[in-house]
Image: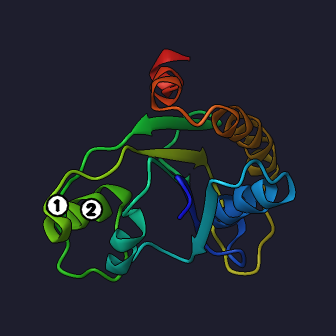
């Protein structure tokens, strides 16, 4: 099993929502090391909690309208999902499910949020999203070049 899991989610057919999966394509084209696994999906599901088992580091990547810069990077803490359904979950709620079913702390998990603007079905990436994708790809290259918890903690957006 790979030590590092990178999970990119979003819909390639919905404009800027494709940012997460597009970062995974960049990673695949630049294959970093053997201890890396990537998973892509349209959205996070309760079953994804099982993918966290046995990992040393986990990186979730998603498009975000709430991001006020090209991207943000932060360590995640488990948080119970407050919605009435598990149709789509946040990364923090996936961590919470992991802890509930495994009865232990989740591995260290981080979220890379990439600023996104347009999510219309059939649209291409916006110009801003293309620029943000380039910046995020460079950042991910740095992260995966040193898959160490201490380094990733130093890289949190607030410390850049």
Q: N-terminal of the two: label 1 or label 2?
A: 1
Q: Give the quarter of the image for residue 146.
A: top right
Residue 65 place in picture, x, y as percent? 52, 51
Residue 48 place in picture, x, y as percent? 40, 73
Element carrying mark 1 = loop
Q: Is residue 90 left or right of residue 80?
A: right
Q: Mark 2 sits on what residue? A: 93
Q: Residue at x 51, y 30 (%)?
A: 152
C-alpha distance separating marks 1 and 2? 5 Å
Q: Quadrant of the C terminus?
A: top right
Q: Give the quarter of the image for residue 95.
A: bottom left
Q: Residues within 10 Å of mark 1 (few under 14, many from 20)?
A: some
As drawn, the label of residue 80 is: 1
Residue 145 place in picture, x, y as percent? 70, 34
Question: Is 14 above or below relative to 125?
Answer: below
Question: Is 61 above or below relative to 128?
Answer: below
Element carrying mark 2 = helix
Depth check: give the residue in front, 88 or 14.
88
Residue 51 place in picture, x, y as percent? 42, 69
Label 1 with label 2: CB-CB less than 8 Å: yes
Q: Residue at x 71, y 74 (%)?
A: 12
Depth check: give the residue in front, 49 or 84.
49
Q: Is residue 138 left or right of residue 120?
A: right
Depth check: give the residue in front, 49 or 36.
36
Q: Is residue 81 visible?
A: no
């Amino acid at each position: 099993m790979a030590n590092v899991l990178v999970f990119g989610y979003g819909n390639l057919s919905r404009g800027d929502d494709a940012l997460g999966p597009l970062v995974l394509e960049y990673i695949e084209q630049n294959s970093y090391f053997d201890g890396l696994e990537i998973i892509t999906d349209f959205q996070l599901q309760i079953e994804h909690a099982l993918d966290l088992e046995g990992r040393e580091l986990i990186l979730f990547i998603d498009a975000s309208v709430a991001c006020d810069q090209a991207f943000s990077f932060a360590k995640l803490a488990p948080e119970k999902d407050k919605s009435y359904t598990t149709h789509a979950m946040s990364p923090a709620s996936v961590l919470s499910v992991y802890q509930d079913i495994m009865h232990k702390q989740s591995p260290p998990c981080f979220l890379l949020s990439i600023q996104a603007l347009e999510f219309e079905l059939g649209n291409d990436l916006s110009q801003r999203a293309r620029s943000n994708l380039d910046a995020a790809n460079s950042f991910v290259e740095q992260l995966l070049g040193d898959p160490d918890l201490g380094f990733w903690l130093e890289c949190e957006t607030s410390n850049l």
